[in-house]
Structure formats: structure tokens, C-alpha cells
Image: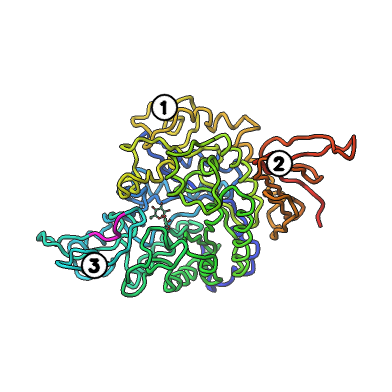
């Protein structure tokens, strides 16, 4: 690869850049495919599935953290940013994977975790030993109250409990507290320290030099904290999704990303970023994707929208307006490794407010899930997401129609949320269960036959009906729907930027992009569709005779169904 002498050369081709219209498939590597039979997914398992991913029709893969890690938080606790977790493989395996993915025309995004390291990282170990300057790379503070026995402020960990842990000096005396916005095994880094900045810029180059096409930035809104670490007005985890909070979304963070952008622009082709930033408003989100900062940022309002046309429409309008303001593409996500799978979110009554996963999980015990309904809506939702302008992210297993696994026994749960919430929130394991590829019983081809270990989370027996191998040959399967939608999106939608709403009855959505119309029915009654060739529908359409004519047939769009129609260009 060559380094360009002058950043900015890429601007000429930016209008058609791949990352503006891509469909990105998220690989949660631990649960994707296990090549060596230890019950944990790995890089060689992923390599073996590249033909599957290429034939699905996606443009890029985002691989969740694969670095050495105690795996206290599924790899988001990184002990070494320039190597591979032995359970997942070797650096040579990673390099082979990058070559092979590129050979299959797939770009690769990695996950960078700059807000915190693992407590096992040599920097934190040096900090515990109180080596000179080592504690300045993290956020250590003296406690409050008598004997400094109270945490330095009222911030809460996202996983539950206080965000501070007190250490003891080598002689056993209680000493300072360190900040961890997530698990105690994930100490927050001090981004005012130039050593921290230099280290991460070097890590970016390490992977860019190996051909990685970009990074998803974990907790991109967390790196800078308000000076003096003041108490939060509302300390509840997640409160900052709707209001300012001194731990999150501070203005100083943008300078960091301006530096990162310069590095990415020095490569040919330029490398790209997508920010995971949970912030209080779209205006705040737009700041992350200004022209000299990051390329894209996840827009989570769509993922949090209930299955209600009016709410979805306003979320879509807001997201597009914000992205347009800063000339960035919108990003559409229905599921990821942190939220309840959408086939399950849509399987219960739909509230009239944004759906947070904690809220969703809290009602598992009270309301039965109608998974058939959830899956029907999930089929309709993907036709909506893939018809929208911008980038779409798919989460592994949604193309098989997997629902959340709600009944994992407590003693097998691994997400720190489960323990840190005092066993009140089951956490995120239910969307991370290893994929079912083939066969009639666990491990469903996830691990080789005669594997020495069970999958790291138990798979439901009922997944026998959802294995990829069976869906391959079934034109009515979820997999077939995804394949068809991805092919038709390439043929009819790439390059048609704007969305234009079309009048449609209450409880439905209809819009035009280029020559295609997308119709979505979230009501419980069928609606008439306009004329035009039906390219694809998420469930079978109903045909009947028009009341006004004995010959002309009228198609009706059933409840919880979407359709793509080919209509005349206007
Ligand atoms: O609101 C939040 C914090 O601002 C959370 O939703 C947070 O953004 C989210 O939990 C961050 O997730 C990412 O970082 C975590 C890891 O556990 C998740 O899996 C990852 O996606 C810590 O690294």
C-alpha cells in the first residue's frame, strides 16, 4: 500500500465512496464459527464462511474485538491492541483473513476500544504497581468522605453499580480510586495524556498498514470527561441518552477524531470510521461526522423505534435531515451485539416510546413473545432498512431470523451486566448465542463434529428449524429474503440518494427512491398497493379484483408486511 503525499486527493472520488452506500455485516467473532472445537468462534471459522458472506451480497464486514483479552466483556477489555486473542487465532490468521476477504470483494472494519483498556493491560498493571507516570494514563482520584472511603463522584457504571473501584497499595493500604464507566476490569484511559493519544494513533497505523479498511470506534462519545469530574445531575446509566452528562459527549473529544481523520486520509484508499456514539440529540451526533472528523456514526433511534409507522417515519426524517446537514450518509441498524434481537423486540406489544434494551428485557417475565409475529415484522423491517438511503448494518444471525434467547440459565450467563446489576438484568448474552449452521442438534455445525467443548453459550434445540443449510434451498426463508433484497438493492437503489415520501394510509409508510417504491404496513389490516411490478415482498401479497373493474386485479399489502414495487421514474 502507498501513502499519499497529499491528503485530500481522495476528495475527487468521495461522492462515490463505498462507505456511503455499503451494507456492512457485523461478525461477533466469538459466536460466528468455531474451527478448532473449543466452543468459541475464531478467525479460521470466519475464513471458512467467507463464501457464505460473499454470496449473501454484503459489501463489508465489521469484526468485533479480536485482541488478547480476559474476555470479561466479550473482548471489549483489551490487553494488547496489536495482537490476536489466542482463542480466536494468530496474527497470521488475521492477515490471511484480510487477504481472503479482500479477494472476495469484502472490505473489513475492525473494532477499536479507546475509552478503556483491560485491567490486564501492561499499562494498568504498571499503574497498580504505581510505576512513575503510570497512573496518569488512567483516571485515578482520591475518594470523598472520611478515610476517602466514598467514590470520588456519583457516576454509575453502564453495567450497574458505582463507576469507581478503590485499589490498595502494594503494602495493602487502601489507596486511590480508578474510574471504569463499564466493568471494573475496564479502567478508563486519561485522554488528556499525550501518551494515550500517541499510542492509539500508532495502533490505527498498525492495522491500516495491514490493509484494514476502517474502524468502528467503541464508545466514541466517552473518551473526554468534563474537567474536575463533577457529579452528574442524573447519574442513572443511560441518562445521557437524553440529557448532558459530564462523563459523555464532551466537546474535547472532537479534536481527537480530527487527528484520526488525518491519519486515515493518508492511506490509499483512505480508511474510514464509524462512531458508536450514544448522545442526547441528532445535532450532537452530527458533530462527530463533520467533514474533517469521522465518516459515519450509528444512528440508534431507528433501532430504538417501536414497530409503529409514525414513529419510524419521524426517526427516519430526523436522521436524514441531520446527516444531510453535514453531508454524511445515514446509517441504519436494527440489531447488534448489545441489544435485544429485533425479531423479539417486535414480538411483544409495541409501546409509543423509544425501546431501550433494559426496558425490553424487564418485561420478558410479564408478556409472552409472539415470535412468529416478531419474525414477520423483522422480514418487513429489513426491506424498509435496505431501501433507505445510506449505509445499512446487519448483525449476524438476523439473516437466519434468529430471535433473542431469553432462557439462558443464570449460571451460564457471561455478560457482566448480569452480575453488576445484582442479577436483575439478564444482560446481552441472548443475542450472542453461537450461530446454527447445519445439523439437527447443538452445536448445529458451529463447532466441528466431535468438538471437545460445547458452544460457550447454549443453543436452543428449536434452532434446528433455522439452520443456514436448510434455509439455503428454501425460497421462502429469511436467508432467501436477505439475499434477494441485497441483490435488488444493488440493482435498483445504489446511487439513488433521495427519499421522497408518497401519500399512504395511517399506520403505513411509503416512499420512492429512483424507480422503486417501498411500502410498509405496520397496521393490523391490509392496504391497497399502487400499480407497478412487485420486485419483492416480505410476506405473500393478497390479490383480488378491483371493485370498480371486473378485470383489473388489485394487490393488497397484508399487515406487518413490506413490498418493493417498480414504478415509473418521476
Ligand atoms: O450508553 C451507553 C454508554 O454511553 C451504552 O449504550 C454504551 O454506549 C454501550 O454499552 C457501549 O457498548 C460498547 O462498549 C461496551 C461493550 O460492552 C459493548 O459491547 C460495546 O458495543 C464497553 O466496551
For disc 2, the neighbor class at 10 Å (few under 14, some 14 to 19, many from 20) is some
The quadrant where residue 18 appears: bottom right
Q: Name the residue under label 3.
A: 135
For disc 3, the neighbor class at 10 Å (few under 14, some 14 to 19, many from 20) is many
**Magenta run includes residue 288:** no
Labelled disc at residue 449? 1
User: What residue is shown at x 52% (from left), y 31% (from top)?
Assistant: 467
Some atom of ligand 1 lies within 8 Å of the CB belonging to the residue at label 3: no
The boundaries of the magenta stretch are 161-165
- Tell me the quadrant of the picture where the C terminus can be found: bottom right
Up-down relation of residue 364 to residue 450 (above or below): below
Residue 55 screen position, x and y as percent: 60, 41
Pointer 1 and pointer 3: residues touching (CB < 8 Å)?
no
Q: Which of marks 3 and 2 is in front?
A: 2
Left or right of residue 252, residue 230 in this image? left
Residue 420 screen position, x and y as percent: 31, 50
Pointer 3 and pointer 2: residues touching (CB < 8 Å)?
no
Labelled disc at residue 536? 2
Left or right of residue 428, residue 343 in this image? right
Q: Mark 3: which secondary structure? A: helix
The residues bearing labels 1 and 3 have C-alpha atoms spaced at a distance of: 48 Å
Residue 352 screen position, x and y as percent: 56, 52
Amino acid at each position: 500500500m502507498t501513502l499519499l503525499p497529499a491528503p485530500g486527493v481522495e476528495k475527487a472520488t468521495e461522492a462515490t465512496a463505498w462507505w456511503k452506500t455499503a451494507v456492512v455485516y457485523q461478525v461477533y467473532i466469538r459466536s460466528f464459527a468455531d474451527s478448532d472445537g473449543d466452543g468459541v468462534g475464531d478467525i479460521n471459522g470466519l475464513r471458512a464462511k467467507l463464501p457464505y458472506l460473499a454470496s449473501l451480497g454484503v459489501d463489508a464486514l465489521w469484526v468485533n474485538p479480536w485482541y488478547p483479552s480476559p474476555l470479561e466483556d466479550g473482548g471489549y477489555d483489551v490487553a494488547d491492541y496489536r495482537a490476536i486473542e489466542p482463542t480466536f487465532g494468530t496474527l497470521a490468521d488475521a492477515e490471511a483473513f484480510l487477504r481472503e476477504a479482500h479477494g472476495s470483494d469484502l472490505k473489513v472494519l475492525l473494532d477499536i476500544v479507546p475509552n478503556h483498556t483491560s485491567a490486564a493491560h501492561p499499562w494498568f498493571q504498571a499503574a497498580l504497581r504505581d510505576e512513575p507516570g503510570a497512573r496518569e494514563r488512567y483516571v485515578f482520584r482520591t475518594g470523598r468522605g472520611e478515610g476517602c472511603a466514598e467514590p470520588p463522584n456519583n457516576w454509575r457504571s453502564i453495567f450497574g453499580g458505582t463507576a469507581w473501584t478503590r485499589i490498595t497499595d502494594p503494602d495493602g493500604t487502601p489507596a486511590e480510586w480508578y474510574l471504569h464507566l463499564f466493568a471494573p476490569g475496564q479502567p478508563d484511559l486519561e485522554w488528556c495524556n499525550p501518551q494515550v493519544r500517541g499510542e492509539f494513533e500508532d495502533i490505527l497505523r498498525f492495522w491500516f498498514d495491514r490493509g484494514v479498511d476502517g474502524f468502528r470506534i467503541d464508545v466514541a462519545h466517552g473518551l473526554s470527561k468534563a474537567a474536575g469530574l463533577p457529579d452528574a445531575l442524573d447519574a442513572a446509566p443511560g441518562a445521557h441518552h437524553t440529557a448532558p452528562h459530564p462523563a459523555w459527549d464532551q466537546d474535547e473529544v472532537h479534536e481527537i477524531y480530527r487527528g484520526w481523520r488525518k491519519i486515515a486520509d493518508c492511506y490509499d484508499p483512505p480508511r474510514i470510521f464509524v462512531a458508536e456514539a450514544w448522545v442526547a440529540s441528532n445535532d450532537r451526533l452530527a458533530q462527530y461526522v463533520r467533514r474533517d472528523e469521522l465518516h459515519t456514526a450509528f444512528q440508534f433511534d431507528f433501532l430504538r423505534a417501536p414497530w409503529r409507522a409514525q414513529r419510524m417515519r419521524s426517526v427516519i426524517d430526523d436522521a436524514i435531515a441531520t446527516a444531510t446537514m453535514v453531508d454524511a450518509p445515514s446509517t441504519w441498524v436494527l440489531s447488534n451485539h448489545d441489544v435485544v434481537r429485533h425479531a423479539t423486540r417486535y414480538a411483544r406489544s409495541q409501546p409509543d416510546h423509544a425501546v431501550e434494551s433494559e426496558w425490553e428485557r424487564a418485561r420478558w417475565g410479564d408478556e409472552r413473545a409472539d415470535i412468529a409475529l416478531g419474525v414477520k415484522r423483522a422480514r418487513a423491517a429489513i426491506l424498509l432498512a435496505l431501501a433507505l438511503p445510506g449505509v445499512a448494518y446487519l448483525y449476524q444471525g438476523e439473516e437466519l431470523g434468529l430471535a433473542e434467547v431469553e432462557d439462558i440459565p443464570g449460571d451460564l450467563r457471561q455478560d457482566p451486566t448480569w452480575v453488576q446489576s445484582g442479577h436483575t438484568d439478564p444482560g446481552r448474552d441472548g443475542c450472542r448465542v453461537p450461530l446454527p449452521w447445519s445439523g439437527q442438534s447443538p452445536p448445529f455445525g458451529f463447532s466441528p463434529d466431535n468438538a471437545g467443548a460445547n458452544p460457550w453459550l447454549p443453543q436452543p434445540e428449536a434452532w434446528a428449524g433455522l439452520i443456514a443449510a436448510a434455509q439455503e434451498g428454501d425460497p421462502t426463508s429469511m436467508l432467501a429474503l436477505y439475499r434477494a433484497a441485497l441483490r435488488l438493492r444493488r440493482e435498483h437503489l445504489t446511487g439513488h440518494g433521495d427519499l421522497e415520501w408518497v401519500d399512504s394510509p395511517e399506520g403505513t409508510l411509503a416512499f420512492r427512491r429512483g424507480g422503486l417504491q417501498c411500502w410498509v404496513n405496520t397496521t393490523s389490516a391490509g392496504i391497497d398497493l399502487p400499480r407497478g411490478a412487485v420486485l419483492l415482498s416480505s410476506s405473500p401479497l393478497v390479490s383480488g379484483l378491483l371493485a370498480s373493474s371486473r378485470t383489473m386485479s388489485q394487490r393488497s399489502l397484508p399487515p406487518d408486511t413490506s413490498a418493493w414495487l417498480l414504478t415509473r421514474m418521476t
